[in-house]
Image (cartoon, rainbow, N blue to C red):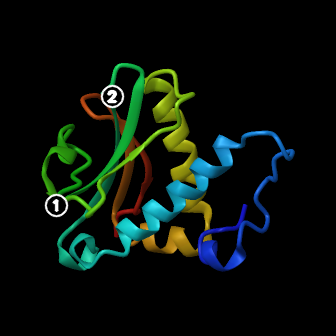
Amino acid sequence: MTGWINLDAAGGAGMPQPAPDAYCEDARFEDSFRRWLLGAIGEPAGSWRAGVRALCFNVHPITPGDHAVELIGAADCDPAAADWALDEVWLPSRPRLALPGDVADGDDGVLLVRRLVRAALADGFAGARLKRYPRIAVGHVDGALDVLWERAPI
């Protein structure tokens, strides 16, 4: 993978290269996800300084058989409140990203998004930006959330 900081400058260096006639949708989607996420968390209105205290990646159906991930910013992230992510105060200018066509259902979508967000959290560049928020979660738009990262109480 190219990492998170120099996606454009790297020109695809480090990305798995498909055979000349093969299609590599996974690598292309991961790159699209990185660009989408970095663009979203770079928007000043969604900044932790602007009152967004948590990020939630919601997977939802867009048409029968097709899914997307939506990023929302929440003003509250009280661990005792099950509905903390309903206090939506911010959506990025491009709030949704369609998931690849081979995502069979919402559960597959959540697994894919969880893996990509964990990779972002582990990356020095993207992780530092994400960890400015006290809580990062992934889940179904109308279901339980999986908290992937949470700042330890002080």
Q: Residue furthest front?
A: 21
Amino acid residing under circle 2: Pro
Where residue 146 appears, as percent x and y from the top left, is 40, 39
Q: Position of residue 51 (x, y in %)?
A: 17, 71
Does residue 42 sit above or below 71 in this rendering?
Answer: below
Answer left or right for 67 relative to 119.
left
**Quarter of the rendering occupied by the N terminus:** bottom right
- Residue 135: give x, y in percent of width and height: 35, 57
Give the secondary structure at mark 1: loop
Camera-nearest label, 1 or 2: 2
Name the residue carrying label 2: 61
Q: Is residue 114 left or right of residue 95?
A: right
Circle nearer the N terminus (1, 2): 2
Residue depicted at 63% across the width and 51% down the height:
28
- Res. 108 mark: none
Dot 2: what SS? strand
Classify 10 Å Cα crowding around label 1: few (below 14), some (14-19), many (20 and above).
some
Query: Which quadrant of the view contains residue 41?
Result: bottom left
Comparing 88 with 77, the one in front is 88
Circle 1 sits on which residue? 75
The answer to the question of whether label 1 and label 2 lie on touching residues, with beta carbons closer than 8 A, is no
Q: Is residue 120 visible?
A: yes
Which picture quadrant has residue 58?
top left
On the rendered structure, is 77 left or right of 107?
left
Q: Amino acid at mark 1?
A: Ala
| Residue 84 position in % (x across, y down) | 19, 46
Residue at 50%, 64% in the rendered image: 35
Query: Is residue 104 or residue 82 the one in the foreground?
Result: 104
The residue nearer to you, when weighing 78 against 4, is 4
Q: Residue at x 51, y 27 (%)?
A: 108
